[in-house]
Amino acid sequence: MSQTTSVRKPVDPPAGPGQPSTRHGQFRALLRSDQVEFLIEAHNGLSAKIGEEAGFKGLWASGLCLSAQYGVRDNNEASWTQVLEMVEFMADATSIPIMLDGDTGYGNFNNMQRLVRKLEQRGVSAVCIEDKLFPKTNSFIGGHRQQLADIDEFAGKIKAGKDAQHDDDFVVVARVEALIAGWGLGEALKRAEAYYSAGADAILIHSAATVADEILEFKREWGDRSPVVIVPTKYYRTPTEVFRDHGFSIVVWANHILRASVTAMQEAAATIAREQNLLEVEERIAPVREVFRLQGASDLEIAERLYLPEQSVDLRAIVLAASRGVELGELTADKPKAMVKVRGEPLLSHIVATYQARGISDVTVVRGYRKEAVALPELTYVDNDDYATTGELYSLHLALQASSESDEGILVSYGDVLFRKYVLEALAETDSDFAIAVDTNWMESVNRAREADYVSCSMPNTRNAFYSEVLLEGIGDELAEDRIHGEWMGILKVAKEAVPRFREMVADICSGPDGQAATIPTLLDRLVRCGEKVRVLYNTGHWLDVDSLDDILAAGDFE
């Protein structure tokens, strides 16, 4: 049984005040603008969406980049129907006009007419064709050896395309390759005149020179007879102001999204191949939820329920940030250590962002020294006004007292410890009542000659430890070196079932002799002595305890 395939014409976006009502009209308005306009290259729906979100008013569907994303050469090796399919995805993903780099029109005048009709059906607003022979070769590969089309034959192709369009605002741009081919300015002007007379809406004058001299000379000779489009891939050092002064209509940034993505993909692939894990790349690449967003997921919460662990909604965070951090000197004269800036944002902002990236939005911060300086939005604050005479466990006690009895588990961390998101994920996903993250690079801490919360565990970090339940046995900076298996990273997870007895133990310690000066390691030690299982999750680096000015400098590179 035969089937009939109908082509859906994309719906044009609502027009803003004073804007044309269709994308075709918007593109024609770009051509007629009294200032230079810009198009960014895109080669699929995702890159098109990124280009639109960056603020561009139009897109260039580059022939080079469309071919490259298929993994083939820019020699018409990708069929015109494959190109057509991809630009339809681009039109569906965006609301701004698209100009297709249509190579030579994929054949003669008949092919050109069919191309124009199909582009209009798919919501593409313009096509640019170049006066070379089919199959074309990229202009930057042996340009002087490339043959150009007969002027009259190419002019006929332009006329055929204009006669085939249904919307008067659809644009046909004639790309002149005479300068690329080494035929000189006179030939370029001659061809531009013939194509303009045949109905071309604009002239794209192309050059492989590394300076813009011949492009500017063409524009001076051509004047304002028609809009002129340029592609400054080779003469990129030319200031954009020069293009404005000479009255060019549109500047096309022709292949830079693809080239940027190639570099990023090569770096990520090489890192994963070298490291044989994802730890070095996961924090440097877009999170999966950003891909969902760019794909147009209308309800992010639905996507998170489908693809992210359910535990993310059952956890809240407590950040202990009451101390000054006297070791940082003048940096903390008017603010606590948690508010010292790294990469333009307070340490606390980076910590909160890591929690939020894991889906944990309920964050309580215990503040003390210069508490008025700790005022980040959308956080819950508990004040330890006795910060100077009490310890971190007392701050935790105040936070637990202030919070209502809830069904949520807790993540506790310090306001001066940076860590990567995967550390939170590993802790959140364990089903243990209590769990801590431990760094196996503890020798680095010893070499820095600073105090550290070293831990002794039921087994060292070996391959077997990955498949076993490693438990905390001891913690403190006085452990014998042969008993040290790592350094506690300052992060503790308490499952929701264990919160009531956790709360009770914290209160009990704080009410005892010297209890208000107790530390979190004191609590961990009590948990172990009381028979609680504290699960250890081994890590290798990927955190930073900010204790000195050197640490502040190191935090600037921490990602």
Image (cartoon, grey):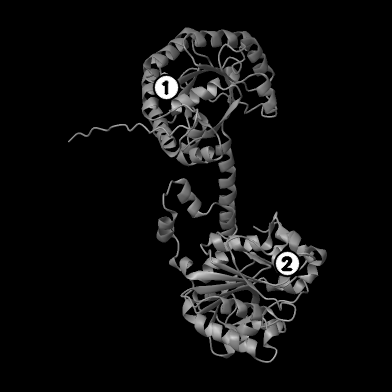
Judging depth in this view, the residue of 525 and 185 nearest the camera is: 525
Judging depth in this view, the residue of 441 and 451 nearest the camera is: 451
The percent coordinates of residue 304 (x first, y second) are 44, 58
The percent coordinates of residue 545 (x first, y second) are 69, 68
Q: Is residue 65 left or right of residue 338?
A: left
**Residue receiving disc 2:** 337
Q: Quadrant of residue 253?
A: top right
Tag 2: amino acid? Lys
Q: Is residue 191 above or below residue 3?
A: above
Tag 1: amino acid? Tyr
Judging depth in this view, the residue of 263 and 171 nearest the camera is: 171
Identity of the residue drawn at 56% across and 42% down: 261
Q: Is residue 2 above or below residue 559?
A: above
Taking the view exactly as shown, the residue that stands out farthest to the bottom is 513
Judging depth in this view, the residue of 209 and 125 nearest the camera is: 125
**Does residue 420 appear in this view?**
no
**Does residue 145 appear in this view?**
yes
Q: Quadrant of the C terminus?
A: bottom right
The percent coordinates of residue 161 (x first, y second) are 41, 16
Query: Circle 2 sits in a helix, a strand or a loop, which is it?
Result: helix
**Residue receiving disc 1:** 106
Q: Are marks 2 and 1 in contact (CB under 8 Å)?
A: no
Q: CA distance from mark 2 to mark 1?
A: 64 Å
Identity of the residue drawn at 68% across and 92% down: 513
Identity of the residue drawn at 63% across and 23% down: 208
Q: Residues within 10 Å of mark 2 (few under 14, many from 20)?
A: many
The percent coordinates of residue 112 (x first, y second) are 40, 19
Taking the view exactly as shown, the residue that stands out farthest to the left is 1
Q: Is residue 56 above or below residue 453?
A: above
Q: Quadrant of residue 518?
A: bottom right
